[in-house]
Amino acid sequence: MNDMRLGDRAKQMDDTKIRARGVNVFYGDNHAIKDVDVDIADRMVTAFIGPSGCGKSTFLRCLNRMNDTISACKITGEIKIDDQNIYDSRVDPVQLRAKVGMVFQKPNPFPKSIYDNVAYGPRIHGLAKNRKEMDEIVERALRRGAIWNEVKDRLHAPATGLSGGQQQRICIARAVATEPEVLLMDEPCSALDPIATAQVEELIDELRQNFSVVIVTHSMQQAARVSQRTAFFHLGDLVEYGETGTIFTNPEDSRTESYISGRIG
Amino acid sequence: MNDMRLGDRAKQMDDTKIRARGVNVFYGDNHAIKDVDVDIADRMVTAFIGPSGCGKSTFLRCLNRMNDTISACKITGEIKIDDQNIYDSRVDPVQLRAKVGMVFQKPNPFPKSIYDNVAYGPRIHGLAKNRKEMDEIVERALRRGAIWNEVKDRLHAPATGLSGGQQQRICIARAVATEPEVLLMDEPCSALDPIATAQVEELIDELRQNFSVVIVTHSMQQAARVSQRTAFFHLGDLVEYGETGTIFTNPEDSRTESYISGRIG
Amino acid sequence: QSRDNVQIAGSSTVLPYASIVAEAFGENFDFPTPVVESGGSSAGLARFCEGVGENQIDIANASRPIREGEIETCAANGVDEIVEVRIGYDGIVFASQIDGPAFDAFVPAQWYAALAAEVPMDGEMVANDAANWNAINEELAAWGMTEADLPALPDAEILAFIPGTRHGTREVFEENVILQGCEDSGAMQAMMDMGMDEDATEEACMSIRTDGTSVDIDGDYTETLARIGSNPDGIGVFGLAFYENNTDTLKVATMSGVEPSTETIASGDYPVSRPLFFYVKAAHVGVIPGLQEFASFFVSDELAGTGGPLANYGLVPDPELAATQEKVANMTTMDQE
Amino acid sequence: MSTFWIVLVVLAVAALCFVLARRRALSAVDGDQRHLHSRPNYYGFSAALWAAGPALIVLALWLALQPLVVDRSVRPLVLEEDRNAALVMSDVTRLAGGIDRAIAMGGLTAQEARGLTADGLRDRLSDFGTALASEVSPGVLEAAQRYRTIEGRGALLRSILTIGLAVGLGAFALWRVAPGFRARTSVERAILGALIAAACVAIGTTIGIVLSLIFNTIKFFGLYPAADFLFGTTWAPSFGGGSSLGILPLLWGTLYISLIALLVAVPIGLLAAIYLSEYAHRTVRAWAKPMLEVLAGIPTIVYGLFALLTVGPLLMDVFGPGGALGVRWMGGGTSVMTAGLVMGIMLIPFVSSLSDDIINAVPQSMRDGSLGLGATQSETVKQVILPAALPGIVGAVLLAASRAIGETMIVVLGAGAAARLDLNPFEAMTTVTAKIVSQLTGDADFSSPEALVAFALGMTLFVITLILNVFALWIVRRYREQYE
Amino acid sequence: MTDIPEGGAHPQQDGPRRGSLFAENPRIKARNRAEKRFRAYGIAAISIAMAFLCVLLFSIVKNGLPAFTQTYIQVDVTLDQEVLDPDATGDPAVIAQKTTFSYAPLIQAALVDRLAQSGIETEVTPDRLARILSSGAAAQLRNHVLANPEVVGETVEFDLLASSRVDGYMKGRVTREALARDPNLDAAHLEIIDALKAEGSVERRFNLDFITGTDASDSRPEEAGLGASVLGSFYMMLVVLLLALPIGVAASIYLEEFAPENRFTDLIEVNISNLAAVPSIVFGILGLAAFIQFAHLPASAPLVGGLVLTLMTLPTIIISTRASLRAVPPSIRDAALGVGASKMQATMHHVLPLAMPGILTGTILGLAQALGETAPLLLIGMVGFIASEYPDSFTSGFTDPNSAMPAQIYEWAKRADPAYYERAWGGIIVLLAFLLLMNIVAVLLRRRFERRW
Ligand SMILES: Nc1ncnc2c1ncn2[C@@H]1O[C@H](COP(=O)(O)OP(=O)(O)OP(=O)(O)O)[C@@H](O)[C@H]1O
Ligand SMILES: Nc1ncnc2c1ncn2[C@@H]1O[C@H](COP(=O)(O)OP(=O)(O)OP(=O)(O)O)[C@@H](O)[C@H]1O
Ligand SMILES: [Mg+2]
Ligand SMILES: [Mg+2]
Ligand SMILES: O=P([O-])([O-])[O-]
């Protein structure tokens, strides 16, 4: 399977979905992202790796302007999606976020029923014409989130009463339910067992057919498995960015190399 | 390193720290833990593995009566720590929890400074005589939590402004700061990079010298690396429990086997 | 910690007078200034009748005489020696906005015709539909009064602000104005002729329309004043003292040709007034320091007499003040009278 | 020793016990806190509680009971007096107090005080600021002397007992201090007891209210048929008797006015809260919120005048005869609408401030979750934040509703005094509360039904709101159970 | 893999979210319009509330500001020995026997002299001349003489308060026409005032006594001040704060954090929400019965007032405290319990601080309500003519008869003389200033405790 994916890579290098140039992020005095340039390709999976606290989540949140909600956070530089600067004043962050979906690092289900959690996005975007269509969308999303079997009997139970991993999958299902063009996933499998992880990776692979996916992960194996491109962050710097294969087998920067080789298991 | 640990195993099988018998847990109608018997040995690391939603967290929370806080949660059966039934009415859950520390699945730092987060436990338990001693305790705990270097310059910044992995390590530091006899860790490394993970595993190994540690993990490798005993849960049942080596190499139950072999990477 | 001041509670109508006296008492005597609470005649008497003792009030002010049932309750609680002191009269006047319609003179019959709920008409009781004051005289003429006896009324909608049913003034208004007017106008006779008995007649006479032409005021005269301020056609019922303090915004009407003033009321010429009282717990005299002195001071000529501060403020002095003074001096209780 | 000093001494003993117990606990483990069951301060607090708690309770009980005991032993002395015993007793206490004051001011020695005679005593004491209403009779003087003796003895005994208790129990608590002693548990148990006691204040208040209303209510129902009161549709009290005292028009008025007030306060308050917590800049919020709270602090009489002088005429200009709309819905400035609008304004901060706090407490991750799905801020607010904050908001609205039911002045001035069953919101109506006040402070005979009805009104309103609250609790429970 | 549906990709949606970020599709447009509308509602709500506040504050200030100034008339009064101390004893006790009535002629004589001196002609008869002065002038003189017995026989210059009508004239409230039918003052009096004013003996100046003074009777509005009742309110608020806040918070903590779910808890809960709906006057009935008649506490005392208001305020504080305790996420409690904190410690150390904003809001609202409440005070004897003296000491302030600001304002608003109406509004200004002062601590504290997590 892996091989097949590797085979795909070459032919899809062409079109850039997101182009970031000179992005700096500050939390007050804390310079969290330092002058990052990156091109994220369409119909590909890009993995962000790097030690904890290096700025992966921060950069990810820049891509759909979720950082707007943190008052201490200041961003400079330019991020273009489909050649449109998302920090342009004419851009409506709402529209942007509809296009660029996100799964957060800490599972944050709404204190509503499982069904309502998933149906929330489709509802506000008007994706379902009627109740039946909505049921279908919810079921499909939950299946894609690899959680349908576990919750199908209690769709109307509160999502906050689920286990950690279940909540995480609900959040994934919630994000894919709105069919975003770009999906940002911040450690989507951190609380998942191997089987569920495999299913989510399957999902990512499926999504890649049409969309672009950015995934933050601490698992080198996972990065190697699912991504075509990998970016390595270190202390706010984008140290190295390139084809996943190259990064893992033949890193240019010594920091990348030591991070990768310091890996365990 | 691993080998040395393997060598230790045999001679420490003797004393039991926690003895659970016929434990059942219900969330309302949901039977989350089904008649579980388990002995957790002193000075050893026990790993709980199993698919997401199988009841690992639930059972872990039984061990220090954190389930008391969920009103819907009902527990039957007997859990003894050092031969004292912790559900006995004479047992003070507070004292119990001081003895049995816990790291939660979702990082939950207090909305206070990093320092105060870690100092809180030692403060209420009176572990420090003076300010200086407290500083030492905090530093030591943060070092053990593998986060000292990252936060030493901003000890008085709010802990909620940290990255996900940093928060998780703060929570680990907070738990070890009180020097519990048993430490329950619910996926402590889920948001950590490999290096931090290694440091935490180091810590677990260190703790094992004196205390007993129970760890929930989704990483088979991690379970194999750090634990001496492993318990496999499935749909609320404790399917198999035994020496980690045996479980991973020679599982008795077919479910265990298929879970282990279904592993990826 | 024993109480050393006189404690008074009761009518808000009497309160201004009581507080003028209390203030002067505090200034001129070594005793502390008495505390005068308001809260209404009924509440004051209720507390008065709670019993005797240090934690009970000494004096109750009332804008009406104490009732039989209240005396009984008092007695049941051990308050059996009560001195009733009439301090004077409260004149009740009819006033309107100073630059409003020319409400200068009334007779009771006009008020009856304007405010009665139902009036006799061709041997039947019909709802009163009078809407304008200038139609009243015609109607009265139709009932047999000579129009020449009736003062002219302006062309203005009927809108009267009268005391609500909680006020003792309402009772006086109903009896001295409405009932009187009912009789004067011949309506009473007409009702009797219809075969109604005396009680029913009286009740019919005194029931006041509720269709918005007559507005009950449960608050104080300041509220009536405010109502008149925003309704130029309105006419309201006030106390004399209140009116005298607000001549800049109000003009008063004569009743049956008599202009209300302390003199005309004291002489009995002006028909609408009510007596004001305070009640002393005789048992407390000799126990509560200053009680006797206060009571005497209240009714002294210097205060309650003609030209005294109370009269200046609008109290109509009691023509029989001397008798009252003697009664207070001897603390003659009600059952000794 | 005066009560003040006793309390001070007891507190000092408690403080001492605190220090000693703390030290003792620490020294028992050679200064290593880790071997203590609880932190050293808890040992201190527990000893201090033992020292001060019972002593102060005993002191309070003593202070409450001593007057009764003294009264019982002095009263026989004054029974010969040809006056009401309660009054003579107050004469006695006043005289005793006067003598004490004279001694305190140096005008009398204790010796002299014992040998006082009744003659001229009134003048003598008046020099020391004690006014007596009449000359002192020997019987009263004797009683006063007895009173002073007993009081003095009582005070001495009281001091000894209280302080002794403090010292004794404090010592006991100190003796109990040992590393294994569960000091924290015992302190926390005491705190929990205090918390429960605090919660019981509500029950005490309810009992108090019922007791203070019930007797007069019963008396009222003895004079006026309960059925006519509860189901009567006219309210027309009259002094001459024959009043109709039906509560229905008043209840209707209460309901109607409260409803309009809530229709004003809830949307405005809630939207304001949402705007402040979700949209407004920090500084705007920091200023606007306390400003809105000023609305809750303006005395209700001002609102009443505002209704009477400004809002009423304004509404008349619109809905009255010859008004802007050309409708003749409104007859006078006072109406349900006038009072409701103004009351609504007063209630705005009750809804806005509380809701703002609750909305602000919804975790940020909820907002992130919704915004991350491409929801607009208003969608986030309406579909995620408000549902999450709902329990608190409901509390705020209920609080506002409660205040609306209990409000008086605005109704008196703004709604008129007429009790009426009518649907037109531009008609004058009145509420139960307004009538309670007016009947209670009116001129009617206080033992007549017209005055006593105030108590019955209070009681009925109390029972009705109680039923509504039980019902609300039941609904909330059901809803919650279904959800879980 | 089991969960992934067989059918492969979902039919591709060229749905609402495709396309340029700059071009808004109809649905987004509609949603953004809804967003704008919602925002506008919010602004409108705030504006409406603020507008009301401004109107109210404006009318309060406009009506009340004149109360802070007062007219004084300078007169030289000869303290005639013949009248005050005929036997020239110089004994204060003898002088004290002369009541204020003896001083009235002195004032009258002084005014006649004053007019003669300045050559002012008037048709006002000498006995009506003193009506330009407050009827308290005699008391002012007498107090001065009692304090300085040696001045008897001398001529002393006094700043005497003008009567309320004269004061009203100076403030433009009273006109000559209006006096035509006023028995208290004639237009001719005003001529005198104009003449004296020209000479500088009549002056309108800031009146501190309004803020610090005590109540006066109906016949001398010019003397009335709010001071004693400010003190009364202060004592009551002290009692309320010291009782209602701890009891309220304690009760809420118990109910929200510790109470088991049982009948007893339900009972308390229902009781509390029911008490919130009890009309304040009923609390007055309770206060009269429980504190005065049963517990024999003194009537008209701020202590009793404070107790009654405490009971009245409790539900407000409890309801808001509970709501904000409930809003603290359970993970915080878990975190504290997990390191071995007791439930009590978790509550006190973590939950309570996080709930603080709501608690403070409840306190602000509760105290504001308590500060402005009159009805219950009516029944426990704090409304009327009460606060004519200051308490002697700090502790006696709790038990000495006193009124409270709202009660005093309510009382003034009812009095007949329009000068009292002005004072009522002035009193409201003082009350609001008091409220702001009281709230400022709470508001600042609340701002400190506010945080999002
Ligand atoms: N608070 C709760 N209320 C109701 N049901 C719950 C609650 N918490 C957990 N459950 C249910 O109990 C079961 C076991 O949950 P638990 O959290 O123990 O799983 P877990 O093994 O820790 O899974 P994960 O690896 O995903 O964390 C799940 O089915 C879950 O939905
Ligand atoms: N809200 C915030 N306020 C202040 N500083 C923050 C905030 N969020 C993150 N930071 C800081 O910014 C840096 C980058 O954080 P970020 O969350 O992007 O890390 P990360 O790479 O996602 O780490 P992890 O793998 O642990 O999630 C860290 O140093 C962190 O402490
Ligand atoms: Mg992160
Ligand atoms: Mg779990
Ligand atoms: O207060 P009153 O009893 O006089 O109406």
Image: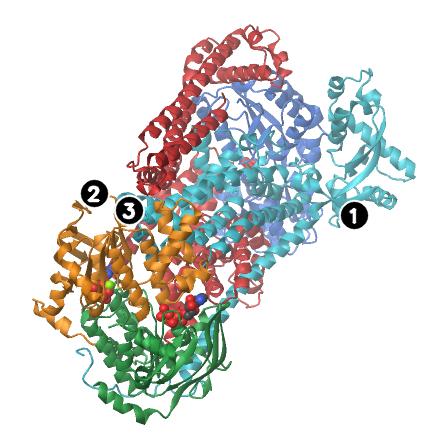
Chain colours: A green, B orange, C blue, D red, E cyan
Instruction: Give the alpha-carbon distance from disc 1 to disc 3, as whole Å.
Output: 82 Å
User: Residue E296: x percent and y percent?
Assistant: 46, 27
Residue, disc 3: B94
* Residues at marks 1 and 3 touching, judged by CB atoms closer than 8 Å: no
> Is disc 3 on the same chain as disc 1?
no
Which corner quadrant of the image does residue D37 belong to?
A: top left
Q: How far apart are the alpha carbons under marks 2 and 1? A: 87 Å
Question: Label 2: which residue?
Answer: B89
Mark 3 or mark 2, which has the lower sequence index?
A: 2
The residue tagged 1 is: E176
Q: Nearer the viewer, residue E47 or E105?
A: E47
Vertical position of residue C303 compared to residue E55: above or below: above
Residue count near mark 1 (Cα–Cα under 10 Å), binned few <14, some 14–19, many ≥20: some
* Residue A155 image label: none
Asked if badge 3 and badge 2 are on a common chain, one would say: yes
* Subunit that carries the residue with mark 2: B
Kind of residue at badge 2: Ser
Report in which chain the residue with disc 1 lies: E
Q: What element carries label 2?
A: loop
**Amino acid type of the residue tagged 3 in the rendering:** Val
